[in-house]
Amino acid sequence: MSKKHPLVKKVLIDSDQIKKRTKELASQISEYYRSQNINDNTVLLVGLLKGCIPFMAEFMNNFDYECDTDYMVMSSYQGGTKADGNPKIVLDLNSNLKGRHILILEDVIDSGLTLDFVKRYFYNRQAADVKIVTLIDKPMKRKVDLQPDWSGFEIGDEFLIGFGLDYQERLRNLPYVASCDVSKLKDWKW
């Protein structure tokens, strides 16, 4: 999908910007972990599916530190454009977290409720350390005191699509991050 989708109001972050910033983040975070005293010199990268997939793939291609990966599916959206405020585990990790250093990779942080839940859940499973990197941060939407340790871009209160961000499970494959023309959603026919 290289041409602009009809539901795109405006491309906010193009593919080149995403690649450049993700490479910078991977470099910074690699340096951070090299400076830590980690027992097995391995960090566990945890992707929150499904939105993390493009960001996590791009990040891993540039991450220069020993890692293994696991994935988790959380739900806080009920198919619309707003979170319902009740994070739920749909699919849990397979990894033992005891004593592990964990880096959560997320596509976007809005209210922070899901990541706050996940971070506390990981510490309850005896993780040694939990850090968060997000491609997009929306701090004005925060409902809890949670800040990512690293973020790619800060964006205002817009409904986003593309590069992992979806509307009803679609449009994740757009190669950019865009604001969605929500005025078209009511009558939109797939």
Image: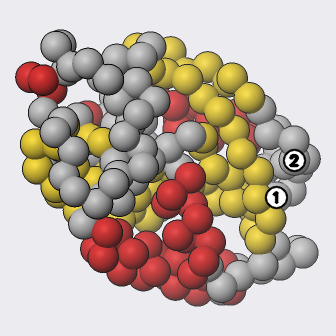
Q: Residue 134: horizontal and vertical position, in percent?
A: 44, 56
Nearest to viewer (mark 1 / mark 2): 2
Which residue appears at 60% of the width and 29% of the height? 74
Residue at x-position 57% and y-position 61%: 56
- Cα distance between the residues tagged 1 and 2: 10 Å
Q: Residue at x 49, y 60 (%)?
A: 55
- Compared to residue 139, the image places residue 175 above or below, namely below
Percent across and percent down for residue 93 are 80, 39
| Residue to which mark 2 is pinned | 95
Instruction: Decide if residue 37 is on the left or right side of residue 135.
Output: right
Along the line of sight, which residue is nearer the eye, 122 or 190?
Answer: 190
| Secondary structure type for disc 2 | loop
- Per the image, label 1 sits on a secondary structure element best described as loop
Q: Amino acid at mark 2?
A: Ser
Report whether 74 appears left or right of 94.
left
Q: Do we see residue 145 in this rendering?
A: no
Which of the pair 141/92 is nearer the observer? 92
Question: Which of the image's four quarters has the N terminus?
Answer: bottom left
Q: Is residue 77 left or right of residue 35?
A: left
Q: Which residue occupies the foreground of this view, 183 or 3?
A: 3
Residue 45 percent location from the top left of the image = 69, 60
Residue density around tag 2, few if under 14, some if 14–19, many if 20 or more, within 10 Å: few
**Residue position marked by numbered label 1 in the rendering:** 100
- Above or below, 98 against 101 in this view is above
